[in-house]
Amino acid sequence: MIPSFSYIRARSLDEAVRYLSLDGARAHAGGTDLLGCLRERIFDVTTVVSIAGLKELTGIGETPTGGIRIGSLTTIADVARNPVIRSKYRALSMAAAEVASPQLRNQGTIGGNLCQKPRCWYYRGEFYCLRKGGDQCFAVEGENAYHCIFGGENCFIVHPSDSAPALVALQASVTIAGPNGRRSVPVENFHMPPSEDYMRETVLEPAEIVTEIVLPPPAEGLRSSYRKVRARRAWDFALAGVALAIVFSGDQAADCRMVLSGAAPVPWRPAETEKIVEGEPLDRDRAAKAAAAAVKNAEPMAQNEYKIPLFRGLIEQQLMAIGGPEFR
């Protein structure tokens, strides 16, 4: 049962920030994650502040430098079908199309997708785990088939967002508004690893709101993609996924950014693997070598070792695909 709370519809961004400064206040945008968290008693709430009516936080448009700006309240569905994103930032369009179900994509927002809470069944269930203030991560000795193989420390969740890996690969940033004004943070630095603070998912401070996502102009020769493997095709989170953003010069990969989903508590970037791809023609041997390097330092748990060959095959396949005629 959802607990009782006060509900406020903010009429401006400044008003939203002011109300979110109240103890126990939470922001409501699309609500697809918030309502689940309230129902499952993930956190206490006294006031829900709706920002859904703030038109300044919606829409997709070009920036003065030739990139694009996506308002944080823009729906996932609108991101997936936008012709500019599909043409210039293909990885983001592909990732948005893989989020949840059509109903949730029509309701959920791009900002909410970046800020959503973990989907670990211990965190979402009736377990007083470390992330909820307890003294242990139950996944360590429990059911951990869907948990991380990289970056696990204290808490072994996997980051649930599909859009985040694509945005990291495309070097996007988020604009944040709060009591101390506005600031910009690269999406790569937006999420909080449990080694730094296992009680937080993002760098957002109290009463701060993501207002927009900004993507830089695409480099000449950029090709990007996102591929996700999941247990159910109809609706599910990633068992393994990979976002690629590779700048080609002829048949050579001049610059490579690779980001994994379903792998770690944050979008995971295997930088050493990127260096293997760069400066060489992207043939099958190069793709196989890069894929092997990507999983070299994996630390699987008792039930998720299957993710290692899954990631290896997925990465090799996607590297070969992005070097092929479909992406030219």
Image (spheres, rainbow, N blue to C red):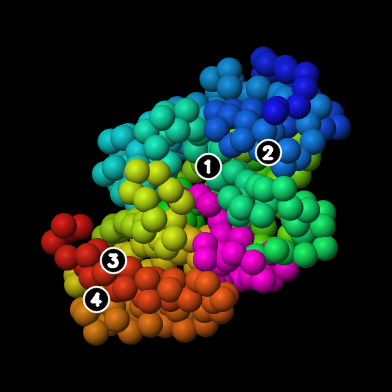
Q: Residue at x 69, y 33 (%)?
A: 38
Looking at the figure, which quarter contains the C terminus? Answer: bottom left
Looking at the figure, which quarter contains the N terminus? Answer: top right
Amino acid beneath label 2: Glu
In the image, the segment drawn in magenta is: 140-162
User: Viewed as shown, does residue 12 lie left or right of 136?
Assistant: left
The span from disc 1 to disc 4 (Cα, nearest Å) is 32 Å
The span from disc 3 to disc 2 (Cα, nearest Å) is 37 Å
Q: Which mark is residue 113?
A: 1
Query: For the residue carrying disc 4, how many other residues have a C-alpha within 10 Å: few (<14), some (14-19), or many (20+)?
Result: many
The span from disc 4 to disc 2 (Cα, nearest Å) is 47 Å
Amino acid beneath label 4: Leu
First-in-chain label (4 vs 2): 2
Residue of label 3: 318
In depth, the one of 64 and 256 nearer the eye is 256
The span from disc 2 to disc 1 (Cα, nearest Å) is 19 Å
User: Viewed as shown, does residue 264 lie left or right of 205?
Assistant: left
Residue of label 4: 282
Residue of label 2: 40
